[in-house]
Image (cartoon, rainbow, N blue to C red):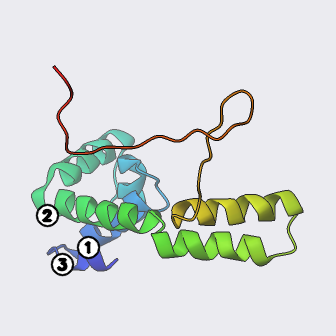
Amino acid sequence: MNAVARVKLTEKERRFVAAYLGEANGNGTEAVRVAGYRGTPGSLRVKANRLLTKGNVAQAVADFQAVRDQEAIATADERDRLLTDIARSWAADGDRIRAVAELNRVGGRHVTRLADPDGNPLSFTVVTGVPPPK
């Protein structure tokens, strides 16, 4: 929990943040209980609300969630590695072909060929930077 370490927290607050983002799965009352706070369900709910609105705790939760969300998104290299693994694997031929096609598409090697109903290739010119006619 490196993101949490940057914010000053007591040991119980650290345990609360870890539980809230971990095993309590966003349930503040459960996170308070796991962190070691004691009391009735109502008092634990109030304590969870106070902790979640406390500046340093709220910042620690937000920081950790931002890091976790960022790490959840695969980079382009990770996606390329995964597709390459599939393309080189003993997966079904259809899966391998789709992986190669996707690698070609994202790598700019994919060309969409347009044709008229008779199968004759269509050609057109794309002009950029020219204002539309009035």
Q: Position of residue 129 (x, y in %)?
A: 20, 45
Please provide percent x and percent y for residue 54. 13, 55
> SS of the residue at dot 2?
helix
Q: Residue at x 14, y 75 (%)?
A: 8
Q: Which is more toward the observer, 88 or 25?
A: 88
Which badge, 3 or 2, is on the more N-terminal residue? 3
Q: Which residue is mark 2?
A: 56
Extreme residue toward the left, this view: 55
Residue of label 1 = 4
Residues marked 1 and 2 touching at CB (< 8 Å): no
Q: The C terminus appears in which quarter of the rendering?
A: top left
Q: Which residue is mark 3?
A: 6
Hey, what amino acid is under mark 3? Arg
Dot 1: what SS?
helix
Q: Are marks 3 and 2 in contact (CB under 8 Å)?
A: no
Hey, which residue is sitting farthest top in the picture? Answer: 134
Give the crowd class for mark 1: few <14, some 14-19, many >=20 residues within 10 Å: many
The answer to whether mark 1 and mark 3 are in CB contact below 8 A is yes
Residue displayed at 50% across by 76% down: 77
Q: Which of 34/65 is in front?
A: 65
What is the quadrant of residue 103 in the picture? bottom right
Numbered disc 3: secondary structure: loop
Q: Quadrant of residue 130?
A: top left
**Cα gap from disc 1 to disc 3, whole angstroms:** 5 Å
Q: Which label's residue is closer to the chain start, 1 or 2?
A: 1
| Spatial CA span between label 1 and label 2 | 9 Å
Residue type pointed to by label 2: Asn
Discs 3/2, front: 3
